Image: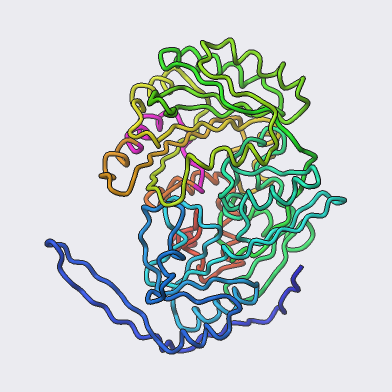
């Protein structure tokens, strides 16, 4: 797709000529500091780009700056909206030459705002969305800004699909670099398990290819090791024959939640690979909070009906929305519940199962949900995803488990503290029964020690990769970064 650069160092350092002015003011007793960067040198970068360089004074700055999570208000000094790999190379070289820190943004569906660096440069890949499908080889090549929706849109024409997340606007690159939970994990593994190759721009401006034969160690690290080694500009995925799935919602009254969850815990230990079940709590339109099960079966409709039939006996089913739908319809069905611009905060814990203690914590500490938009979402990790060896990819938690998302969501005018407190309190209640690490895509900066624990025995190998591909620790604002002090072991 793109030719690799030569092995020579492309970027060179120069003394910075970007002026920095710091203005300090007092507002309601609080000291607030704003840093402004300006220079004709920005014009030099702009002339190199096929895409657009967006600065704070530009009319579209706020629109371009905004992530999916409206809570993130970080103000970058500039945003380079890259359209080509060469744009990425130019931006890396320019920012390094001028000693500006930078971050990397993919599709922009992000919870904690790590992809926006205050007073730094943002390498924005969200406009690089092309998807190319090879139906004969059953592979798809995507650019780094492509979402799950973009990929599914292209592959469904050929009756093919791969493991994605549960929402269409989630970027495939960020999802894959962290692992990638979703409704097809049981049958096809994580998104990371379906990554065949990638192209990466390193800190010195080299474009390198990684696959099973070429830079294979880097491919290993990209499969769940986070965005620690360079800017991933394209990815190639394995595809699987898939047109429709049996999926939907089964809703149960709260008073039956304990019984249903206990029975679910027993049931998921015996489910076939084709059946992956999300569960949790949500609000429905009449204001009720209900327990939901959301099974997805990716095999024959007849076998699927047999597989999910026991779920209907776990309690009184208030609503049964199970039906045969296209995978495209399934992934888009959650979009309305997670609109861009709403404020979100999220905590996670990965549980060995739904023990009595964890069920009680979810019900007693988690309910009532703090807002009509908030939810508890429990992912079922099993099947093909569990049969990958711990050392085969950077993603290390390979035994059956439940990844619990505690999703607080509210409108901008609300007081955020009570929502944040709800998620943190519930997370602390679950922690004694959880694995010590966590899902790196959903861990915040204060949880860096959990990132280390999440990699387990793979951590030392990741440090070696970091030393090899990014020895100067340039990429420290990306997902699950390996902290600079960690490089000393």
Please indicate whether residue 456 sits to the left or right of residue 283 in the image.
Answer: right
Image quadrant assignment for residue 184: top right
Magenta residues, dominant SS class: helix
Please indicate whether residue 21 sits to the left or right of residue 202 in the image.
Answer: left
Residue farthest to the front? 286
Image quadrant assignment for residue 290: top left
- Say which quadrant the N terminus sits in: bottom right
The magenta span reads: 423-441
Residue 76 inside the magenta-drawn segment: no
Q: Where is residue 429 in the image (x, y as percent from the top left)?
A: 36, 29
What residue appears at the point 63 percent right and 36 percent down from the top-left corner? Answer: 330
In this view of the protein, can residue 486 be seen by the observer?
yes
Residue 440 inside the magenta-drawn segment: yes
Image quadrant assignment for residue 217: bottom right
In this view of the protein, can residue 217 be seen by the observer?
no
Residue farthest to the left? 29
What residue appears at the point 56 percent right and 49 percent down from the top-left corner? Answer: 170
264 shown above or below 371:
above
Which is more toward the observer, 343 or 33?
A: 343
225 shown above or below 439:
below
Which is more toward the observer, 277 or 198?
A: 277
What residue appears at the point 36 percent right and 52 percent down from the top-left corner? Answer: 71
């Amino acid at each position: 797709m793109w030719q690799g650069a030569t092995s020579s160092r492309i970027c060179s350092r120069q003394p910075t000529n970007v002026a920095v002015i710091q203005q300090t003011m007092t507002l309601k007793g609080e000291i607030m500091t704003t840093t402004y960067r300006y220079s004709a040198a920005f014009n030099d970068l702009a002339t190199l780009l096929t895409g657009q360089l967006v600065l704070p004074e530009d009319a579209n700055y706020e629109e371009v700056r905004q992530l999916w999570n409206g809570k993130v208000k970080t103000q970058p000094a500039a945003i380079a909206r890259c359209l080509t790999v060469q744009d990425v190379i130019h931006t890396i070289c320019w920012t390094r030459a001028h000693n500006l820190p930078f971050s990397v943004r993919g599709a922009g569906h992000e919870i904690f705002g790590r992809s926006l660096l205050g007073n730094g440069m943002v390498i924005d890949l969200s406009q690089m969305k092309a998807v190319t499908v090879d139906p004969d080889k059953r592979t798809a090549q995507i650019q780094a800004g492509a979402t799950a929706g973009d990929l599914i849109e292209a592959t469904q024409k050929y009756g093919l699909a791969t493991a994605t997340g549960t929402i269409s606007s989630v970027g495939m690159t960020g999802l894959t670099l962290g692992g990638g939970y979703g409704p097809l994990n049981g049958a096809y593994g994580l998104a990371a398990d379906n990554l065949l190759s990638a192209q990466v721009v390193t800190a010195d401006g080299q474009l390198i290819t990684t696959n099973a034969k070429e830079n294979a160690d880097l491919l290993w690290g990209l499969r769940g090791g986070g965005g620690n080694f360079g800017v991933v500009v394209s990815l190639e995925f394995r595809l699987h024959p898939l047109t429709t799935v049996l999926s939907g919602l089964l809703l149960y009254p709260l008073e039956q939640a304990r019984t249903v969850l206990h029975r679910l815990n027993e049931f998921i230990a015996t489910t076939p690979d084709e059946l992956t079940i999300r569960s949790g709590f949500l609000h429905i339109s009449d204001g009720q909070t209900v327990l939901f099960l959301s099974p997805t079966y990716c095999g024959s409709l007849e076998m699927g009906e047999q597989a999910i039939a026991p779920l209907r006996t776990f309690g009184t089913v208030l609503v049964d929305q199970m039906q045969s739908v296209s995978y495209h319809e399934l992934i888009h069905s959650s979009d309305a519940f997670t609109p861009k611009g709403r404020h979100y905060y999220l905590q996670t814990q990965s549980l060995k199962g739904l023990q009595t203690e964890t069920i009680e914590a979810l019900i007693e500490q988690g309910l009532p949900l703090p807002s009509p938009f908030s939810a508890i979402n429990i992912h079922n990790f099993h099947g093909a995803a569990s049969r990958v060896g711990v050392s085969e990819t950077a993603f290390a938690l390979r035994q059956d488990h439940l990844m619990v998302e505690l999703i607080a969501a509210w409108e901008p005018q609300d007081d955020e503290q009570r929502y944040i407190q709800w998620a943190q309190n519930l997370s602390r209640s679950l922690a004694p029964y959880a694995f010590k690490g966590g899902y790196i895509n959903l861990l915040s900066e204060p949880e860096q020690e959990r990132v280390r624990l999440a990699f387990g025995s793979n951590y030392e190998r990741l440090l070696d990769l970091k030393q090899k591909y990014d020895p100067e620790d340039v990429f420290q604002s990306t997902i699950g970064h390996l902290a600079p002090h960690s490089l000393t072991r």
